[in-house]
Amino acid sequence: ATNNNVMEAETDNNTQPSFQRTFSHKIFRMLKIITTLVAILLLIAQVISLVYLPFDGVELLLKIFLSSFCVMIILNELEWSGILRSSPLLWNWLPRGYIYAFIGLVSVEENNLKPSSGALNTLPIDYTAAVFIETASWMMFVMGILYISLSLCCCQLIQTKVRENYKERVAERKKIFEDGLTSLEFRQNDPTMT
């Protein structure tokens, strides 16, 4: 009899919609998290380049623009700004990838110092800072190429369907929960049930 109760409980749990994310949903969320972290690293790299690299007026303006683009990327990936969410350039993964790759390449070129002898340790600055800046810039470029590639493979459509499916399952689970509470409250307040 105990095994039957366990089986019935498992069946009841399996018939309810799951509120857990699917594997593909977790992958898409991980992509957003990684892109956000790369944008934060690139923002830090711009601050480091202000401290360690020599620059003129135009390069200062480029650093300011790159920093503002990094903030825009962070807001876009976290979906915190309605203006960015409704922008077709940043909503669609193909132009988003081009923008991210372009930002990465501009950062690489803008912070590019060529050592005189070909070795990083001959730079007039701390070469670990230069390596960090280059690495963050190339990481943003790679994220842009990844978004372009995923867009060409129609992964954005898959992501949209996965997110819609998740929202439906959570809404259905919430409705079941609320209906369950309502029927429980009704039974507790019904004088004929006592």
Image (cartoon, helix red, strand yellow):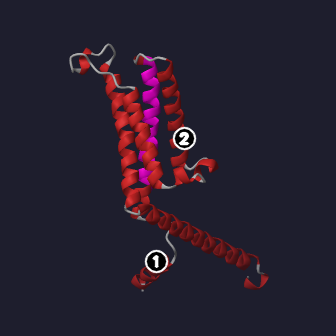
Q: How crowded is mark 2: few (under 14 residues within 10 Å), some or many (20 or more)?
A: some
Report the amino acid beneath label 2. Met
Chain-order first, disc 1 or disc 2: 1
Numbered disc 2: secondary structure? helix
Q: Main secondary structure of the magenta part?
A: helix
Q: Position of residue 80 (x, y in %)?
A: 59, 47
What residue would you read off at disc 1?
Answer: 14
Is the residue 154 above or below the residue 95 in the image? below
Is the residue 101 above or below the residue 30 in the image? above
Q: What stretch is highlighted in magenta?
A: 29-51
The residue sitting at the front extreme is 58
Q: Where is residue 43 in the image (x, y as percent from the top left)?
A: 47, 32
* Residue sitting nearer the eye, 29 or 99: 99
The residue sitting at the top extreme is 124
- 181 sits left or right of 128 in the view: right
What residue is shown at x 52% (from left), y 25% (from top)? 61
Magenta span includes 46: yes
Q: Position of residue 87 (x, y in %)?
A: 58, 51
Report the amino acid beneath label 1. Asn
Res. 142 image quadrant: top left
Q: Position of residue 34 (x, y in %)?
A: 41, 46
Q: How far apart are marks 1 and 2 (CA)?
A: 41 Å
Q: Which of marks 1 and 2 is in front?
A: 2
What residue is shown at x 41% (from left), y 51% (from top)? 31
What residue is shown at x 71% (from left), y 79% (from top)? 187
Whether residue 21 is visible, yes or no, is no
Task: Locate the N terminus by quadrant.
Answer: bottom left
What residue is shown at x 45% (from left), y 27% (from top)? 46
* Residue sitting nearer the eye, 32 or 173: 32
Magenta span includes 49: yes
Q: Residues within 10 Å of mark 1 (few under 14, many from 20)?
A: few
What residue would you read off at disc 2?
Answer: 72
